[in-house]
Image (spheres, rainbow, N blue to C red):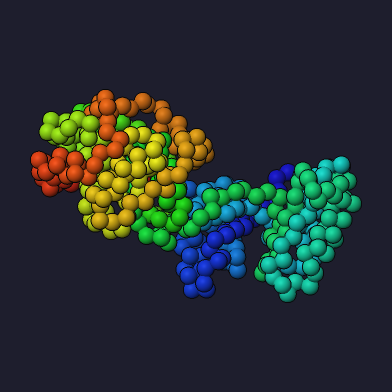
């Protein structure tokens, strides 16, 4: 017999540290994002707020809990049984839930959070009284240090009883920290960088550069697949994927500039174009998947030359991460498989790329190019790909 869950208890963390006005604004945005998440999945829901918690009433509490646990700003979610905040009702509901999970000799504990301080019993008193009822009726054994099952009780305007906690991503609700353009290759790093900046509440517009004929067509296909995985996290927002041609720029760099500077010139051009797109899309920053010294274009010197091509901030969430850490996150969020499913190599990469070019060398190389015309050519041919 399945537990009679009737709601989802949603916990958040960092939001509660904000001042009253900002906290209310963030809580409302989180509630709206949760609603959008459930609406997309066609899960019925009624959302209410209580201090420190969001409650979702639904006929599909398990499914709703799984979905909500992917929403940025959510620390954890639990399918719950809700009852009036009376000790007898709490004991009865906790016992019914415990009987589904606890048999003779099962180690368990009761953990109460008394959010409503007017409740006449302390958390410890509730733990003892409810725990004794469960022990007597099921034959389970109380173990506070390493229980197999924890029966949770959260007392507020109602009492919420639960036996599982689904961990969420934490962070801030999407849409509370501005909007940025993400330089999106579809490889391992850029999706992780995008995910991490979204976790800080920043909406993103994905900008992919099509390097044809120097990259195969499957590069574009891979990018779209990875973008769709990320779009599933964009609750409360509709993620855009823009694709801009860059092959004509690479041809000019190869034909008219020192060959060892191709990668640096390419990164600077991407940054210039991204800044223009950011202005058009209402974004105030650029997100890069660069990790310091991971490849030749990410040395300190090359990163400095790259970001200097933009007048708006270039954010690098991965700058201090090593590859193993990045891969771990990619696997956890579900982008790794799509990012590595197809091998993509850029044939414009020189055999001996410069790792420490000077600003003078770059300026001299770019002086022989019509930079503005190259940027305009890319902007004029940008296309948007539907992700929904």
x and y, in percent, of residue 13 in the image: 57, 60
What residue sits 27% from the left and 45% below the top? 305
Horizontal placement of 250 versus 174: left or right?
A: left
Q: Residue at x 31, y 43 (%)?
A: 301
Front one among 380 and 366: 366
Q: Nearer the viewer, residue 58 or 253?
A: 253
Q: Please indicate whether residue 13 sits to the left or right of residue 298 in the image.
A: right
Image quarter for residue 231? Answer: top left
| Residue 382 in view here | no
Figure disc tally: 0
> Residue 173 in the image: x percent, y percent?
47, 58
Q: Is residue 226 above or below residue 11?
A: above
* Residue 167, x across and y down, in percent: 60, 48
Instruction: Name the residue at 69% across, 70% down.
Output: 116
Q: Position of residue 200 (x, y in %)?
A: 45, 55
Quadrant containing the C terminus in the rendered view: top left
Left or right of 268 in this view: 115: right
Residue 343: quarter of image = top left
Which of these two is toward me, 293 or 387?
Answer: 293
| 361 to the left or right of 56 | left
Viewport quadrant of the N terminus:
top right
Is residue 359 something that shows in the picture? yes
């Amino acid at each position: 017999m399945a537990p009679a869950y009737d709601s989802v208890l949603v916990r958040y963390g960092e939001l509660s540290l904000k001042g009253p006005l900002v906290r209310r604004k963030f809580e409302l945005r989180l509630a709206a994002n949760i609603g959008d998440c459930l609406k997309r999945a066609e899960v019925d829901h009624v959302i209410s707020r209580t201090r420190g918690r969001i409650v979702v009433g639904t006929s599909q509490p398990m499914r709703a809990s799984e979905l909500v646990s992917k929403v940025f700003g959510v620390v954890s979610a639990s399918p719950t049984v809700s009852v009036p905040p009376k000790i007898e009702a709490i004991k009865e509901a906790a016992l019914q839930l415990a009987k589904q999970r606890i048999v003779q000799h099962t180690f368990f504990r009761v953990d109460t959070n008394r959010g409503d301080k007017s409740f006449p019993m302390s958390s410890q008193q509730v733990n003892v009284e409810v725990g004794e009822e469960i022990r007597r009726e099921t034959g389970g054994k109380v173990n506070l240090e390493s229980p197999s099952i924890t029966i949770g009780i959260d007392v507020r305007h109602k009492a919420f009883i639960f036996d599982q906690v689904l961990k969420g991503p934490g962070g801030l609700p999407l849409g509370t920290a501005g909007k940025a353009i993400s330089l999106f290759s579809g490889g391992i790093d850029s999706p992780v960088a995008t995910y991490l900046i979204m976790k800080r509440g920043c909406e993103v517009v994905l900008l992919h550069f099509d390097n044809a004929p120097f990259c195969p067509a499957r590069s574009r296909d891979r990018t779209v697949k990875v973008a769709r995985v990320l779009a599933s996290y964009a609750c409360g927002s509709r993620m855009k994927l823009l694709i801009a041609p860059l092959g004509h720029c690479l041809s000019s760099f190869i034909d008219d500039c020192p060959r060892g500077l191709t990668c640096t010139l390419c990164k600077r051009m991407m940054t210039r174009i991204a800044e223009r797109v950011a202005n058009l899309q209402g974004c105030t920053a650029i997100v890069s998947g660069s990790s310091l010294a991971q490849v030749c274009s990410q040395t300190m010197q090359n990163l400095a030359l790259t970001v200097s091509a933009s007048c708006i901030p270039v954010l690098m969430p991965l700058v201090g991460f090593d590859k193993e850490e990045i891969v771990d996150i990619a696997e956890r969020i579900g982008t790794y498989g799509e990012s590595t499913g197809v091998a993509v190599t850029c044939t414009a990469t020189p055999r001996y790329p410069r790792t420490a070019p000077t600003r003078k060398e770059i300026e001299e190389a770019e002086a022989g190019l019509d930079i503005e015309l190259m940027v305009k050519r890319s902007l004029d041919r940008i296309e948007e790909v539907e992700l929904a």
